């Protein structure tokens, strides 16, 4: 699916500092409907700060944030979620001690006329949505902590899609997964894209990025060092852009 003219979400000239530390400086990024935009960079590049601004955790010091072409100012993650921006943070995607069904809804459970939760309907809905993602759930009351890391990531993605996210931000979804589970998680990324969602994938793994990415944005010490369409870059070139290219070679020669 091709992207639309107006990005689903766009950051324009975003800057953010913490005391004397300038985390982001004049950073711009746009994610289109039906595309996967990969955000790459080394530790300390500013990736986490940027996605926290996109998801309403932080406010930028300067710059503009737009959703479907309209300027927004998120004061909380709830406001971002209400605008269709769903973020799956690496370590906070699910709550291990809570059940699969409760994790799937997280406060948005279906209610009976009595205003009590309809747990039967909740379990049927969760099982159906998870089944579409390849997760077969026998007992929705089992703790999420009993699922594998890949299954927990899949649950979080299925939850976002079910509740109508137009923008899905994934923070290092494959970093703690084995090869098979990582491939499954990337397949779900492709599913989200095919359903018309604008996906922003944050990753250190160039191979994973190149497997699903339509556009690539590389951050380096708080600034955008490169932005490429998939048709304009090879995986080897993308690796060099992320690794620092000439700077790495210079440092090696200096040692």
Image (tube, grey):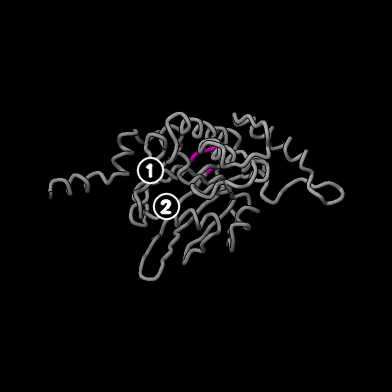
The residue lying toward the viewer, choosing from 47 and 15, is 47
Are there few (<14), some (14-19), or many (20+) residues within 10 Å of tag 2?
many
Residue sitting at x 47%, y 65%: 62
> First in sequence: mark 1 or mark 2?
2
* Tag 1 secondary structure: loop
Q: Magenta segment range?
A: 32-36
Q: Left of 149 or right of it: where is 251? A: left
Residue 64, numbered circle: none
Q: How far apart, in angstroms, are the residues tagged by discs 1 and 2?
A: 10 Å
x then y, percent, for residue 80: 60, 55
- Residue extending farthest right: 113
Q: Are marks 1 and 2 in contact (CB under 8 Å)?
A: no
x then y, percent, for residue 91: 49, 49
**Above-or-below relation of 219 to 210:** below
Residue 34 among those drawn in magenta: yes
**Above-or-below relation of 12 to 2:** below
Residue sitting at x 66%, y 34%: 129
Are there few (<14), some (14-19), or many (20+) residues within 10 Å of tag 1?
many
Q: How many marks?
A: 2
- Residue extending farthest bottom: 19
Residue 47, numbered circle: 2
**Above-or-below relation of 102 to 76:** above
The residue lying toward the viewer, choosing from 130 and 247, is 130
* Tag 2 secondary structure: helix
The residue lying toward the viewer, choosing from 14 and 132, is 132
Quarter that holds the N terminus: top right
The residue lying toward the viewer, choosing from 212 and 78, is 78
x then y, percent, for residue 222: 37, 57
Circle 1 residue: 204
Residue sitting at x 60%, y 47%: 97
- Overall secondary structure of the magenta section: loop
Q: Left of 130 or right of it: where is 220? A: left
């Amino acid at each position: 699916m091709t992207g639309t003219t107006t990005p689903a979400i766009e950051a324009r000239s975003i800057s953010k500092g913490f005391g004397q530390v300038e985390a982001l400086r004049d950073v711009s990024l746009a994610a289109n409907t039906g595309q996967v935009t990969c955000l790459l960079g080394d530790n300390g590049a500013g990736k986490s700060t940027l996605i926290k601004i996109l998801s309403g955790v932080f406010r930028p010091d300067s710059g503009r944030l737009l959703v479907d072409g309209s300027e927004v100012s998120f004061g909380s993650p709830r406001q971002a979620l209400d605008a269709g921006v769903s973020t799956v943070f690496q370590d906070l995607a699910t709550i291990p001690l809570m059940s699969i069904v409760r994790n799937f809804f997280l406060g948005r459970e279906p209610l009976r006329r009595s205003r009590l939760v309809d747990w039967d309907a909740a379990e049927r809905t969760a099982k159906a949505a998870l089944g579409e993602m390849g997760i077969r759930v026998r007992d929705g009351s089992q703790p999420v902590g009993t699922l594998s890391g890949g299954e927990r990531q899949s649950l979080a993605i299925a939850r976002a899609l079910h509740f109508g996210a137009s923008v899905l931000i994934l923070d290092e979804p494959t970093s703690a997964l084995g090869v098979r589970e990582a491939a499954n998680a990337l397949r779900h990324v492709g599913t989200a894209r095919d359903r018309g969602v604008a996906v922003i994938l944050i990753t250190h793994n160039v191979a994973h990025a190149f497997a699903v990415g339509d556009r690539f944005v590389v951050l380096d010490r708080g600034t955008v060092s490169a932005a490429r369409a998939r048709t304009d870059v090879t995986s080897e070139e993308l690796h060099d852009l992320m690794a620092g290219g000439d700077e790495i070679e210079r440092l090696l020669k200096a040692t």
